[in-house]
Image: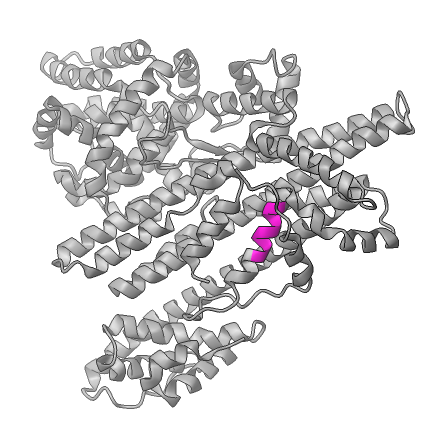
Amino acid sequence: MKFGKWLKQQIEETLPAWRDKFLSYKELKKLVRLISSAESPEYGKVDAEAEFVYLLNNEIDKFNAFFMEQEEDFIIRHRELQQGIERVIDTWGPNGTKPSQAEYNDEMAKVRKDIVDFHGEMVLLVNYSNVNYTGLGKILKKYDKWTGRLLRLPFIQKVLEQPFFVTDLVSKLVKECENTIDEVFPVEVEEEIVKVQREAIKVAGKGVFRNTVTALLSMQEIRRGSSTYGHFSLPPLDLPDSDLIHSFQLNSPIPTV
Amino acid sequence: MEARPALSIQRSGASQLSNHVVAGGLSSSLPALSTHLEETCQKFPNTQQAHAERELMTRPLAHATLLPANNGVVGHIFSSSSGFSSDIHYSSALPNEQNSRNSPFISQSPINTAALPLSQSSNSLLPQSTIPSHHNKENSGSWCTDPDFLDFPVNTPVLSSQVENGSCSGIMRSEDFGKQNDWQEWADQLITSDDALTSNWNELLVDSDMNLEPKTAYQVAKPCTTVPAQNQQLPSPSVESHSVVIPSSSANNAPAKPRMRWTPELHEAFVEAVNQLGGSERATPKGVLKLMKVEGLTIYHVKSHLQKYRTARYRPEPSEGSSEKKLTSMEEISSLDLKAGMGITEALRLQMEVQKRLHEQLEIQRNLQLRIEEQGRYLQMMFEKQKSGLDKLKGSSSNPENPPAPSDATNESPTKIELESSQRGNGNSGTGTVNAKSMLERSPQEVCGEHTTPETVDLEKAETHVSESSSQQPSKRPRIEE
């Protein structure tokens, strides 16, 4: 699948509030074509490159700003969630101030849902980072190809240091979340697992979940193989449960607004 | 030069200011700023000199709104300013590009912000030996007209930063440390409502954007910065978070604030401070800022963070996904009704599985991307090393078809052969650089195929690959299939 189309899909499928935060791939591609076709003197070419770099930097600013804002939100929410769990345990848990199995279960259910969605959102942010990075790489590759210049390598080195690409903190939060979830969820029983797999299809309508399913499958799709497979390309994605995950997509009764 | 003594004071003033802009966010109230500058002005007994300076001083005062009370704005300015330096005559002596590339961004921005108000005057009176004195006049000239004026502040950061980064940086720093305390209080006074100023700033931003756009050169903005540079200037052991200045050139950015990269540790400190002050509702940004005592943290950062914090606590499902979440809960209820056996927990578990998987894959992908770029960089380096070697070779031998001289290492020979064949293949495709690059690109194809093979082996493979058929370059690209 062509990247432009794939990116468009990603954008459509993502959380609505995120939609305008992605790379303006199409516009940049048009600019590259414009630059390459313009029969301009050397000065004009330099100018065009400057313009291109300027736009790219703008995009990077955009990513950075959005990413760090989300990251900040996540940090706050993460702490709040942890506190929330402690509160539930301390209040309604077996050793709490007002132990109550019913209340505990209720509250825990809410907390679990929150955590799982939170986890999902964080993963989506990491995905966001990745999608944009990939886009940048591709547009730079196009630029190099069409103008014969060597912008890609140095520029991408710069990108690698950008806040939006350094997703370490978010990944760490994700892992912590996973640990918390392990603690908070009841122990998984064999039958449940089977049931889970059988009933999979009906679950996929949910917001964040739906997004993550899409993101995962899209990733597989975009790495399937390309006509311009080069040394800078990634190998195809290896997803063992690909079929299962595909089945998640069948039922999407409520379109994302 | 007469101006010299005045300059040194101003510059030290600038450095102090810089600390404050970073630490306190000069959402300056003009009066405070003007009075201060006026005081500095009055120190000069020499009427002629004082007059000239006062003139120059008033300009910055009048336009002090440009002070990026928000470093981001400065950052903004800074980002495009490197391009402008060419516009400035006195940039000739300054290693413009070097500075913007080598020096981490943030180290310059504080200087910039600091330097801004005073630099507007100090530029003309630049103490730098590299700046000829006659530029004073030019500057005064440029002060008169508005468009120039708008350009000017943009220009100045470059100069000041270069200036600072140049010979005087050492001096600057020592001055910084010495006078920091005074300025803390001073900046505190300045920390009032930033609204009035930011709107001015926005307008100016818009205008300057127009000017900026066409002139931005390639060395524009490493948008990011690194902490170490800042730490050099402002020793702040407690700051793990990075006050990242984002050069935001878009006029849409509402008060282009310097973006702080928060960390859990920093947030923890924040929460503690808030709790000490009686909770999120009662705590004020100023109070929290004071309690936290974190270098590089501005009241602006604290303000916005506090806002987020309050929202997160009192509306547990904050705006970002709220509409989704409503949808989700409705879906959930209906889907629960539908599914007999599957409880919420199982559904959640499933969701977790997918999410975990996605995250895993993302991490793998990211690591791969990093490695690919590393490889690319390594080869590029080899290529360049080899190129210089080859150039020497070419100098001694006129026949490019000569087999490469015995190379020092196996690593080097493949790249050499690449160069040779690339020259041979010049006729086939585009420019030599593109060609060589495609050769360069092809060798890592082998590398990619075997993720764990050491690099030497890969390069050898590339060598055989390349020497086999240099003329088949285009067809080789899709050859690798996995």
What residue do we see at 14% from left, 28% from top? B147
Residue at the spot x=71%, y=48% of the render?
A202
Is A230 placed left or right of B100 in the picture? right
Point out residue A130 in the picture as x, y percentages from the top left corner. Answer: 50, 52
Q: Is residue B299 left or right of residue B357?
A: left
Residue A209, image quadrant: top right
Colour convention: one colour
Task: Please state if B234 lies on the left or on the right of A202 as rendered.
Answer: left
Q: Is residue B363 visible?
A: yes
Q: Residue B316: within the magenta?
A: no
Which span of residues is magenta-colored? A210-217
Q: Is residue B439 above or below residue B184?
A: below
As rendered, which of B120 and B207 lies closer to the eye?
A: B207
B265 or B349: nearer the viewer: B349
Visible residue check, residue B293: no
| Residue B85 x %, y % | 19, 41
Residue at screen point 36% across, 57% down: A139
B400 or B214, which is in the foreground?
B214
Say how many tags the image has.
Answer: 0
Q: Looking at the magenta stretch, what is its main secondary structure?
A: helix
Q: Is residue B322 above or below residue A223?
A: above
Q: Residue at x 29, y 80 (%)?
A: B422
- The location of residue B205, given as percent across then percent down, is 27, 28
Residue B152 image-quadrant placement: top left
Q: Nearer the viewer, residue B180 or A133?
A: A133
| Residue A216 magenta-highlighted | yes
Q: From the viewer's perspective, is B339 left or right of B61?
A: right
In the rendered image, residue B141, in percent from the top left (x then y), is placed at 8, 26
Q: On screen, B138 above or below A222?
A: above
